[in-house]
Amino acid sequence: MAERKGRARTTIQSSPTLDDVARLAGVSTATVSRCLNSPQQVVEDTRERVLAVVREIGYAPNFGARALAAKRTNTIGAIIPTMENAIFARGLQAFQEELGQHGFTLLVASSSYRPDYEEEQIRTLLARGADALLLIGFHRPSSAYAFLERRGVPFVVSWAYRQDAQVRSVGFDNRIAMRALARRVVEFGHKRIAIVTAPCDVNDRARERVAGILEAASEVGLDIDAIRIEETPYSIENGAAATHAVLSESEQRPTVVMCGNDVLAVGALRAAKSLGLHVPGDLSITGFDDIELAQIVEPCLTTVHVPHREMGRQAAKAISSLLRTEDVPQNQCLEARVVLRESLGPAAS
């Protein structure tokens, strides 16, 4: 390898070309292109030999020229609501890994849960050459959908599912998933329920989760108008403050606080501890998402396990198929399941 490296330095100019890689690796330029763009199509020994040469001589593909020739950049944009916690991390990692298997590169932006800012980022990512987009949830201005349709840009919605959705989606049904958790809460004897959630007016996932709780409560004859709903942006600190509010302002203290995600639920645990309440003896708390944080806090959180990695993989496969004009299912619904842990117990009397 050292000899090859020496030869490369004496025979390669400052800007190595595709031909240089092919000559040193003993393969055709077409094989080099496949190694870089569709590595899964090349046998391992050949792929490793080509990539070793690429690293040795410092070859970097001219993506600008390639994009002009192919009218495609092989870049996919993803706009997620936040980078401040781990809610989207696992799914996005799997999304990127799967895209890489199909020769695509990922660009990520964050909308801060602002639909107007997301629309601006959609335009920015497309201006930078994104061939397709991953979007989170269905809630955004109709002008954003109209813009994507006019531009003819493929996109997939994830982290949400609606049977009647008119756009391609790979996700899970937030309402059904939270309703299943709320039914388990009711089975534990809880009648006084409080909800701590993200603002519902700009977040369809949060809105559907609240609806799922109210449906489960209504099924057993609970007065849903008596259920206190506190909206707050996602953070541990906000979850704690919102839980303080529902515990201090209710005429009858709730026996369970159901949170819209695990981050808010960890804040609720902090609030309960500060008030001297034992969880779950005095107060039960539930989350949603089943991120790693849910398993390391004390007590561990009862929550809903979201198939983040599978969702990311399937969304990437759907986008790859769209760009290759293959047949893609209109909607794909993955299963989210209830995970019972120590933070949910029988209702306090």
Image (cartoon, rainbow, N blue to C red):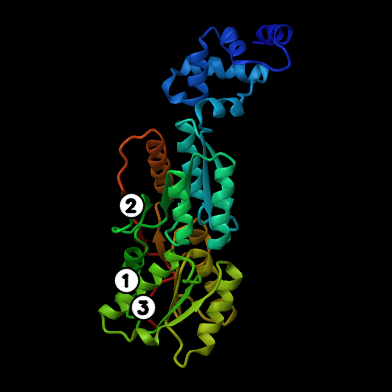
How far across and down, in percent of the image, does residue 290 sit?
Answer: 45, 58
* Cα–Cα gap, marks 1 and 2: 20 Å
* Residue under the point 48% across and 52% down: 147
Q: Quadrant of residue 142?
A: bottom left
The local secondary structure at tag 3 comes to: loop
Q: State the residue in front, 171 or 14.
A: 14
The local secondary structure at tag 2 comes to: loop
Q: Is residue 280 left or right of residue 172?
A: right
* Cα–Cα gap, marks 1 and 3: 11 Å
* Residue 113 visible, this angle: no
How far across and down, in percent of the image, does residue 150 sit?
Answer: 45, 48
Relative to residue 181, is residue 21 depicted above or below?
A: above
Residue topped by disc 2: 334
How far across and down, in percent of the image, does residue 311 sit?
Answer: 40, 48
* Residue type, label 2: Leu
Q: State the residue in front, 315 or 61.
A: 61
Crowding near the residue tagged with mark 1, few <14, some 14–19, many ≥20 C-alpha atoms within 10 Å: some
Q: Is residue 77 left or right of residue 182?
A: right
Crowding near the residue tagged with mark 3, few <14, some 14–19, many ≥20 C-alpha atoms within 10 Å: some
Does the residue at mark 1 contact the one at mark 3 (Cβ under 8 Å)?
Answer: no
Circle on res. 346: 3
Residue topped by disc 1: 184
Crowding near the residue tagged with mark 2, few <14, some 14–19, many ≥20 C-alpha atoms within 10 Å: some
* Residue type, label 1: Arg
* Residue type, label 3: Pro
* Residue under the point 56% across and 28% down: 68
Q: Nearer the viewer, mark 2 or mark 3?
A: 2
* Residue 207 visible, this angle: yes
